[in-house]
Image: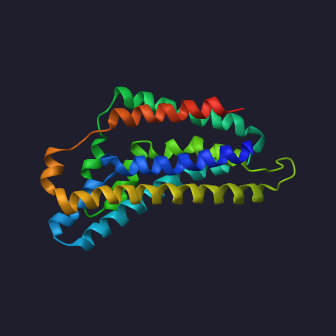
Amino acid sequence: MEGVDTATALWGAVVASGIYHGINPGMGWPLAVSAALMDQKKGSFFKALLALAAGHLLAMAAILFPFTALLFLAEWQREIQIGAACLVIGLGVYLLFNRRHPRFLARVPPTRLALWSFLAAIAHGAGLMLVPIYLGICRTIETDAGHAAASGLMAGNAGVAVSVALAHTMAMTISGGLVAWGVYQWLGLRFLSKSWFNLDLLWALSLILVGAISLFFVH
């Protein structure tokens, strides 16, 4: 029962982090609003949102799959999770003191939203935030590490990584899409230019919190 409760809580964290990333303007929903307003087409809104989702999903996969390969070493799962948690905390501390947005993101043209979304998620540590949660989910799955074939472990861990990336991205896209649609339908471009809200401090603190929680539950 405890393992089931832990797994449920971890999957809840995957979805919650997706919702959090979705409402954070730094992950790109204002770009979907801007595309629709400039083109005066609702279709442009959904195309932009789909591109942002595709880039975010690729970023999640790019971060999670290397850790999937590391989990071949099943006997080192605990140490790998501790290292990942410390890495997340370290990035959070760095962003806490250095909150300037990476300049290279401003050089990506608006026509390449998927690329921008991918780079933004990597640069801000969005994918890295999922790593301790993903590792925790892998540890809740009953596996006889001493007898399981490496290919079986890899396939199982890869499946979990895909599920985590998809669940997270769906939550991100739905929450961000709802916020963006509300701005597009009722508030408009003036809201984006005058009412921009910045979550950089909260973002950095959330990375530290996720890493700290992961360390607390490592056993």
Q: Is residue 191 visible?
A: yes
39 or 151: nearer the viewer: 39
* Residue sitting at x 38%, y 32%: 95
Residue in front for this viewpoint, 44 or 182: 182
| Residue 86 visible in image | no
Residue visible at 38% across and 28% down?
96
Q: Which one is in front, 74 or 192?
A: 192
Residue 175 in percent (x, y) is at: 38, 55
Q: Residue at horizontal 30%, vertical 65%?
A: 48
**Is residue 39 shown left or right of residue 143?**
left
* Residue at the image point whose x is 41% and y is 29% from the top: 94
Q: Which scheme is used to colour this image of the protein?
A: rainbow
Q: Quadrant of the N terminus?
A: top right
Looking at the image, residue 213 lies above or below residue 37 = above
Residue 214 place in picture, x, y as percent: 60, 35
Q: Nearer the viewer, residue 135 or 197?
A: 197
